[in-house]
Image (cartoon, rainbow, N blue to C red):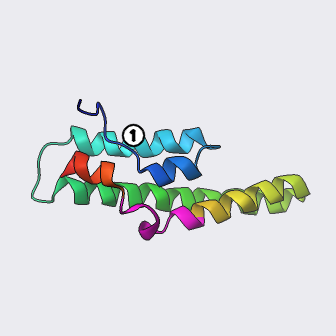
């Protein structure tokens, strides 16, 4: 049975469980790749580029959030923002998720 939409790499879904809005945003960029007409650039490569771009934006957002929380001087908020920043830093490495078989199979 075919998958109805491009799958977000499983490792990203697993790590981002507590941030479902980020998973949704990753799904959005994959859906955009799927909706675009064919191009000279292979669809899998376009999907990888789209995911990298969105993960880069998550990093910028997490860094900004961390700076704002540090300015608030609330230890609980700072700790949560630091934890999120570390997580986003880890998953931002393409090596972490690039081997996802379902994503490859969908876009090959």
Q: Residue furthest right?
A: 74
The residue at which mark 1 appears reads as: 28
Q: Residue at x 32, y 48 (%)?
A: 102
In terms of image quadrants, where is residue 22?
top right
User: Which residue extends farthest front?
Assistant: 1
Along the line of sight, the residue nearer the viewer: 41 or 87: 87
Q: Is residue 105 left or right of residue 8?
A: left
**Relative horizontal placement of residue 96, taking residue 80 as reference (left or right):** left
Nearer to me, 17 or 23: 17
Whole-percent x, y for residue 6 in the image:
31, 41
Left or right, residue 61 beside residue 34: right
Q: Quadrant of the N terminus?
A: top left
Task: Give the SS element for disc 1.
Answer: helix
Decide: is 40 above or below 32.
Answer: below
Residue 99 in sight in this render? yes
- Which stretch appears magenta? 89-99
Q: Residue at x 35, y 62 (%)?
A: 99
What residue is at 32 percent from the left and 59 percent from the top?
48
Magenta segment, prevailing SS (helix, strand or loop) = helix
Q: Is residue 63 visible?
A: no
Query: Residue at image x 55%, y 49%?
Result: 14
Q: Position of residue 106 (x, y in %)?
A: 24, 45
């Amino acid at each position: 049975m075919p998958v109805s939409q491009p799958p977000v790499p499983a490792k990203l879904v697993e790590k981002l469980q507590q941030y479902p809005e980020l998973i949704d945003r990753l799904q959005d960029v994959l859906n955009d790749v799927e909706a675009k007409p064919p191009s000279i650039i292979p669809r899998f490569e376009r999907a990888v580029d789209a995911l990298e771009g969105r993960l880069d934006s998550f990093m910028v957002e997490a860094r900004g959030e961390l700076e704002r929380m540090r300015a608030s001087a609330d230890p609980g908020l700072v700790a949560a923002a630091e934890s999120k920043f570390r997580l986003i830093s880890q998953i931002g490495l393409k090596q972490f998720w690039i081997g996802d078989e379902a994503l490859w199979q969908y876009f090959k």
